[in-house]
Image: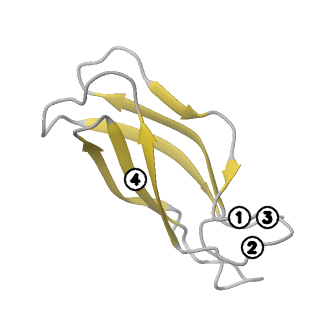
Amino acid sequence: GGAEVTDANLLPNSILNITVKAPNTSVKAPDTGTGGIGHFTMSIDGLRDRIRFLKNPIWVEGCSCSKCENMPLSYTSHWAFPGPAPPKGTYFDVWIAVYWECD
């Protein structure tokens, strides 16, 4: 299996709360978790434009290809988005890349 979004919520203060999980399938480092995220976009039902949070990847939890001492399997982050929060129950889609191993 691959990486997955395990939780995503639109909060009333125009914040997206998202948790992603790495697949933990690394042969070289079986405890490897989520080291980075990128290419991160959201679409809210009823809005014409998509919201781009990240175009390029970023490291999380102080990780890099050469060093990572705190790479959790799951990673939660909060992202502000423009405009008012939609009504509770509004559908939304998230596209995000999750990185867990450097080669």
Type of the residue with mark 1: Gly
The earlier-in-sequence mark between 3 and 2 is 2
Q: Residue at x 40, y 16 (%)?
A: 49
Q: Residue at x 40, y 30 (%)?
A: 81
Q: Which residue is mark 3?
A: 102
Q: Residue at x 35, y 40 (%)?
A: 15
Q: Which residue is mark 2?
A: 68
Relative to 29, 18 lies left or right = left
The earlier-in-sequence mark between 1 and 4 is 4
Please name which of the two marks, 1 or 2, marks the residue nearer to the observer. Answer: 1
Cα–Cα span, label 3 and label 1? 15 Å
Cα–Cα span, label 4 and label 3? 23 Å
- Crowd class of label 1 (few under 14; some 14 to 19; many from 20; radius 10 Å): few
The earlier-in-sequence mark between 4 and 3 is 4
Please name which of the two marks, 1 or 4, marks the residue nearer to the observer. Answer: 1
Q: Which residue is mark 1?
A: 62
Is mark 1 in CB contact (under 8 Å) with mark 2? yes
Q: Which residue is mark 4?
A: 18
The earlier-in-sequence mark between 3 and 1 is 1
Q: Residue at x 73, y 65 (%)?
A: 63
Is mark 1 in CB contact (under 8 Å) with mark 4? no
The earlier-in-sequence mark between 1 and 2 is 1
Type of the residue with mark 3: Cys
Cα–Cα span, label 3 and label 2? 11 Å
Tell me the SS state at disc 1: loop
Look at the picture and state if 44 lies above or below 100. above
Please name which of the two marks, 3 or 2, marks the residue nearer to the observer. Answer: 2
Q: Nearer the viewer, residue 11 or 98?
A: 11
Q: Quadrant of the C terminus?
A: bottom right
